[in-house]
Image (cartoon, rainbow, N blue to C red):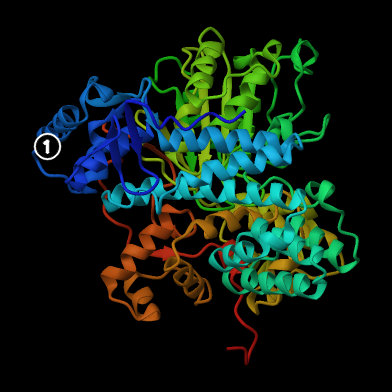
Amino acid sequence: MMPPHHTSARTEFRILGATEVWVQGVRIPLTAAKQRTVLAALLISPGRFVSDVWLAELLWGASPPATRNAQLYTYVSRLRRCCGPGLRVVRRHRGYHLVLGTAWFDWAAFQQLAEQGRRDLVKHRYAEAAACLESALKLWRGPALSDVTEFLNRTELPALEEARLGAIENRMAAVLALGRHVAALPELSRLVTEHPTRESLRGHLMVALYRSDRQMDALRVYEQGRRVLQEELGVVPGTALRALHRAVLLEELPGPAAVEALAPVASGPCPDAAPEGAPGRGGVSHQRHRGPHSPWLGLVPAMLPTDPVGFVGRRSELADVLEVLRGSRSGYRAVVLTGEAGAGKTALAVRAGHICRDDFWQGQLYIDLRREGGGAKSPLEVLGCFLRALIPERGADLPETLDERLQLYRSALSRRRVLVVLDNVVDARQVRPLLASGPGCRTLITGRRSLASLEGVRGVRVGRLEAAEARELVVAAIGGARLDAEPGPVARLLELCDGNPLALRFCAARLAARPRWPVARLVACLEQGEVRPEEWGEGSHDPLNALRAGVLELGPFLRPVLRTLARGERGAFTPAAAARRLNWTEEHARMALDALVEAGLLGSVGESDGVFVYPSDGHPAAHPAPERYRCSPLVRLLFPRPAQGTP
């Protein structure tokens, strides 16, 4: 049943469009952008502590004025005066938190409606799902956060837009399941034009065209999407879209009632979405839980993936991680592994988790926070997975809201000793609610970004393997005799892989699959760009999948920058050299390079591969900007050079 839109509530807050406050049907004017920014920042984190440091960064960026605390106090005081008792902002330590109480908030209402619509969809209640999702999307009055500072807009808008697109995709799935494909065609055509790399929308358009007796048009839409993905990202369509293409080609696409078999729910699987008995991604069992019949009853959660075979090197980094996980005097309860794509962060985290399994005898929770298509899993969904494993007797009786699930999660961990491993974290906002707060618990995080806003978390940088370690990794796959026979080509192969474990593993796998190939032949293929991305095949360790999500998250102006640098000469380069290649100023080029380093898609030469600690203010210690950069071999494979004569 859909929750009502409380238009008669005494106080209403709106951010899905202009930032507005309504009290008893009267709009309260908020004339200052920074005042609106403070309100929006508190609304997005209801009931949670928002530090002065973070608010200042959202208001003024990296250079706040000396009077920032006084100005913050002024903005909050004005908000209290103009909004009346409906706005309860509490000062706590060095920050604020907002208590919504009975006030109505459009973003919270949207999330509730969208979640209910998704649940109806996976339970095959298509009419209810379509109605609920339509009500959710009607709450959007325009671009969200349209009148706040650019810093808040840049930080929070992507998550809101992702939620809106997920609701749109789910609504389209419900509409198609109801057989309304003809009516959906105009909107789907517009959506695919606006979001050409969104494979779920493209799949929905193909289904609508096919069911409208336009098979050739459906195949043409697939081919257009394949070219867009190849030219812009250097990747091939995902498994679901390829399966849909095959079904259209063979005229085997099911009717409306069975469309989910080839077009799964777009905004992400949840435990109820998977077939009964089917395991989910990220080590979480996505089985339906029906009260006392939960398969978790009597079990201690042990969700860690298999201990990596052939793990080499990383002695220093492993020791630093274990010091945090096992130590009681360090003061840290979480450690974050960062590094560029393919650096081996997940392998190191899983290895560390297995080493200290006996230290966390009451359970090890693990989840991959990225979806297969590249989106981010929501904390609400992840908490549902964890709570079903920790409290199986609750079955399907779990709280509906994020705050309630968060309180239950913290209570469940308060007297336990549990390790929580959060793999492929997208940003700090996604991981904050999932941090294990129990005194005997520890959290191990992996991600390409630095997550600098997480306070009091110890960070370990996962860099390149040393030459001896890189050789050891290849030897484990194909043996030492084959390498000893070609010392020169082997040295060049290790140089091309640049100490990147994922690149090394795939080169080793390619040689192992071709025992008669000399190493020199693979080296020649790599140097001449003859190893195309699609040749690496499919699978959970596919380098295309490892990088695809990160590239998709880049701003439109950064993607061609990465492509240009990846297709340039190998080796380290300076900002000045990059500026000449891009035909930009050096300052402009340096900003783009630093953004790509932060995204984990570019490496800085000379950066310390080791331990760094975030001070209590949440910002890394100041250090000189790196002067040389390098492009990882995986990124180069993602953007192969065009064949000779190709523009």
| Secondary structure beneath label 1 | helix
Q: Nearer the viewer, residue 171 or 409?
A: 171
Q: State the residue in front, 58 or 417.
A: 58
Tell me: residue 161, above or below residue 20: below
Residue 271 against residue 605 in the figure, above or below: above
Left or right: where does residue 513 sit relative to residue 494?
Answer: right
Q: Is residue 507 visible?
A: no
Locate residue 241, reporting x and y percent. Answer: 74, 59
**Mark 1: which amino acid?**
Gln
Image quadrant where one finds the N terminus: top right
243 or 410: nearer the eye? 243
From this viewpoint, is residue 503 visible? yes
Residue occupying the point 77% across, 53% down: 179
Residue shown at 60%/16% (left/top)? 360
**Left or right of residue 255, residue 500 in this image:** left
The C terminus lies in which quarter of the figure? bottom right
Figure check: 313 above or below 147:
above
Where is residue 615 shown, x and y percent of the image? 29, 32
Q: Callout 1: few (<14), some (14-19), or many (20+) C-alpha neighbours within 10 Å? A: some
Q: Is residue 159 left or right of residue 277?
A: left
**What percent of the width, then of the height, locates residue 399?**
57, 19
**Would you place residue 274 above or below residue 568 in this image?**
above
- Looking at the image, which residue is at 90% across and 65% down? 251
The image shows residue 384 at horizontal and vertical percentages of 62, 25
Furthest-bottom residue in this view: 645
Does residue 455 appear to the left or right of 130 in the view shown?
A: left
Residue under label 1: 71
